Image (spheres, coloured by chain):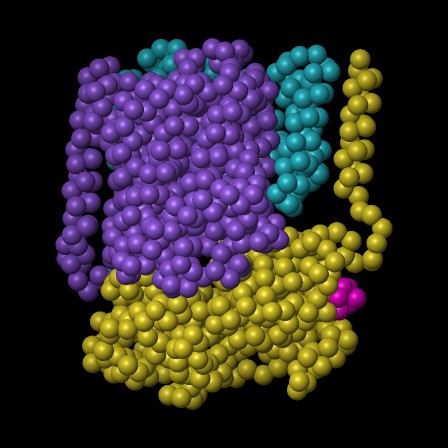
Amino acid sequence: MSWELIIQEWRLLPSMFLHVITSPGTVATLFLGTLIGLVVGVLPGLTIVMAMALLLGFVFRLPLEWGLALLIGIETGAQFSGGFTAIMINIPGTPAAAATVLDGFPLAKQGRAREAVGAVIGASFLGEILGELCTLIFLPFVTLLALKLGDWEIFLVTVAGIIIAGALAGKNPIKGWIAGVAGLLFAMVGMDAIWGYPRFGYTIDLVKGINFVPALIGLFGLSEVFMVLKEKVPYQLTGRPGRAIMRWDLIFRHFPTIVRATLVGVGIGIIPGIGEAVSPWVAYDWAKRTSRHPEEFGKGSFEGLIAAETADNATSGGALIPTLVLGIPGSGPTAILLAALFIYGVRPGPTLLIDRPGFVAFTVALFWAGALMMRIGAWLLSSLTIRLLYIQRELILPLAVALGVLGAWGSGFTYFDVMTAFAFGVLGYLMRIRDYPPAPMVLGILIGKIADTSLRRALLTYSNNLLSMFLRPAGLILIAFVIFLLVSGRRIRGRAVART
Amino acid sequence: MEEHGSEGQRNAGEFLAGIVLVGFSIFVIVESLRMPQRGPIPYVLSPGFLPLLLGFILFLLSTFVLSEGIRGGGHRKLGMWLGGISKHEEFWRWLIILLMTGGYTFVLGKIPFWMATVAYFLAIFIYLRIGGPARIAMYALGFSLFVSYVLPKLFEMPLP
Amino acid sequence: MKHRIVTLLCAALLALAASTAGLAGPAWPKGPISVLVGWAAGGASDIVSRALALEMEKPLGTKIIVTNVTGALGAIAARQVLSAPPDGYTWFGGAAVHGTWPLLGAGPVSWNNFYSWLAVMFPTTIYVRADSPWRTIEDLLAEIKAKPGKLKYGHPGPGSNGEIFAGVLLATAGLKGQAISIPYSGGREAGKYLLGKEIDFISVTMGDVTDWAKAGLLRPLANLYTKPMKFEGVEFRPITEVFPKLAPLTAINPFFGIYVNRKTPDDIVVKITEAFIYAVKQERFRKIAVEERAGVLMPLFGIESDKMMSKIESARSWPLFELGIAPLNPSKLGIPRLEEWKWPPHARAEFLKPWPEQVEVMFRKLRAPS
């Protein structure tokens, strides 16, 4: 990768941004996309990937710039608004918003939902803008790192992700880790990627494996419905609904947290497939360790909320740009973007910078314009969305069930997926009443296949010299990190026991 | 409900969860040992390697939970706890909502999606007593229209 | 009060029913067609199916909606297509690997349950890094011979065209199992690890990494095809120059197309054929599915596509079984080895419902020298 090509993209960025915001068609489709994204993100059960995949057929009827604007609009819109439901009804719309729940929902219960939503608007906006900027500036390093990152390192990152999420998501790290390990085990069901062996494949549906979207819907959505509606008088949010309150002082005060979370998002975003689910947890953990008020985390800390949301949104940039210049999809949404580009006749890969100068800058400009439009729109519409999510739990939660069933069906179009969602709903409920947090399990199901494939492929690649695998420098750093997490995790647990 | 329950009930729950988890982890260990072994280092590269490892970790973690349950005397109070559950009103509410939701997912593919959705909303709104008949009908129909018509149309989705 | 609700309900149900009922028009198609692609969005199966669907909409005069129903190498989607009524409204889309499903325990569904329209074939290629010392396939094989069990190669997954090609090539050169086979999820990922110097060569679908070859990062050594190809200025030597007896093996190359239930009525099959012929002639289809991905446009339908599906069945089933991926012996299903292949290969093919005669005529016309 030559520097001149990259510098050219930097130089083209301002004019591309101007080009995007001055072409009415692009702005209109981008806006439509963000609206669809907002709907998808706010409705539990519908996921970004599902919406983008289903709309692909429509997208191809539009010219390239509009089609891309629509898809990117959906992604930025949904990524951001997944946090809305996390705060207001305790159901994260996307797996990446699982860490947002930890502090967002307690804040809503304290009657501070409007401030929480405001903080999310600000933090996610900064995360997205800074994330894409960082990735574009460090593009040569980022692509080099993406090529150098081997299976062994990817496996270690998944291990770190489960350890952190397990330790943070609940009151008792042991139970969090049990949930995480069980999630990893659920991901083992189905065809193994090294030998093609159908593990636990007792029926053809099990050979296919457990799809993570129905599991997410069941564990987060349906179990929450059972949890709340079993009460004779379900809780109602206190405080008055209204427009989101932007607390700029909070954003400024936690600016170091935002910078750290952005770096985490960009760094972990380059790991294909697991970046966006793991990065909020790592950022949250880092924020908690450096915070002056770590005891507030999990009880309604703005700092935790901001860290998780910033990293979540910064990851999309970290994932997207290497995808464009390497042509290897990082996450679900980027895989769909790649498919769209192929059909449009744009071939992502190293030749993209030569064949279509300015294309990367154009994409970043679309993301920026989308991010800006999204936040202004979200803030203006927030009085409506907040009011909707304030309505009686007895009304909104059954609606969440129906949407969850529709979403589970839409994730794979099989009855097995719907049944999976229901089964995980029951499991999630049983876990919650026994204080097993569902979030590490969802993470485990999401990253389990990658953890398994990367571990055994690393072992296979180094089968004639295992020692050299352990001596890979990046791997050594990660091993040290994992050991640090385990040791400090025990200390956190020790303190928790001492308190009770 | 457990949070308000006594220490003994809590430990009974821990004990039961521990038993289930230990059983599950043993199942996983046995099954993964039965998977074929291939490749240059057969044991480590078997499809059962990571499941075995995870099963072992789960076994360790769950014996920890189990031992805490036993230390708290959970195994002695188990019968009492299980007997007590059915007296809770919340348990029955949970069971009814669970059955409604389960019924909803179960009838898909046997009757059209919109019909199942309307029936589900009517049933649950009536059970939750969200208001008078007019309010129930309005919300059930409005929500059904949205879930089973507007959204699938918007995303060009095939329906069950 | 109760009465009012009942009336309201009835009215709403009627409105819903009315909105879903079709309007009068041609006999078929009356409504949108849905294509279930058995692989995830973004892959070759997905892109070829979408490109075909996009062009077939016009001659059929209806919307064609593509959905991805992934799992079990496409068998999950295929099962759903067969369980839908055979009215031409539900198609299967993607790679032509139907013959391997019964072997992998996916049930008795195979190519003989479908009419297949194959559109495009992608060759399989062995690439090395451009900075590696091996300039020809002979160099690479000599290196493997010199260092048995040391070299590592990547391919797009267990049982993929890449793994079978490399496996058969090594066996033909008398080096069976002398290089370590490492599966990735897709050819592009294998290419990334080759560039990262984790492995020594890759055996992947040609079009997956042609841009890296063009950018001077990779060098193709051998192509599983019978003729030399030139793509974006890069030469691809056919493997048959070195091993002429590998020519029938081209049947392991991935073929992509669309498929409908074999019980579908003849008039609908004819209409689909007309639309298919129109689609493969379109410039946009050629650009997306053929030129950009280095494919070979090879429209096949009628008895010829059945023969090809059966050859693919033979070409893939035996290596899958011998590599230990498929637990079932293909001879139990009557599948002959590729060397012993003849038409009809087994009882399932003997009693097939034939294609409409009109379709066979259309195929001969398409194949006639133009």
**Does residue C73 appear to the left or right of B156 in the view shown?**
left
Which chain did the renderer colour purple?
A
**Magenta-drawn stretch contains A447:** no
* Quadrant in which the C terminus of chain A appears: top left
Q: Is residue B133 left or right of residue C304?
A: right
Residue under the point 62% across and 82% down = C343
- The front one of B68 and A356 is A356
Is the residue A186 above or below the residue A81 in the image?
Answer: below
Query: For the point 53% across and 11% down, which residue is it?
Result: A233
- Shade representing chain B: cyan
Residue bounds of the magenta highlight: C263-271
Q: Position of residue A62 (x, y in %)?
A: 60, 52
Foreground: A47 or C370? C370
Q: Tell me which corner region of the image, top left, top right, bottom left or bottom right, holds residue B138.
A: top right
Residue C21, how many percent across, how many down?
Answer: 80, 43
Q: Name the spot of residue A386 as percent of width and height, x first.
A: 51, 21
The residue at 17%/36% (across/down) is A484
Chain C colour is yellow
Position above or below: A421 against A231: below
Asked if the magenta segment contains residue C269, the reply would be yes
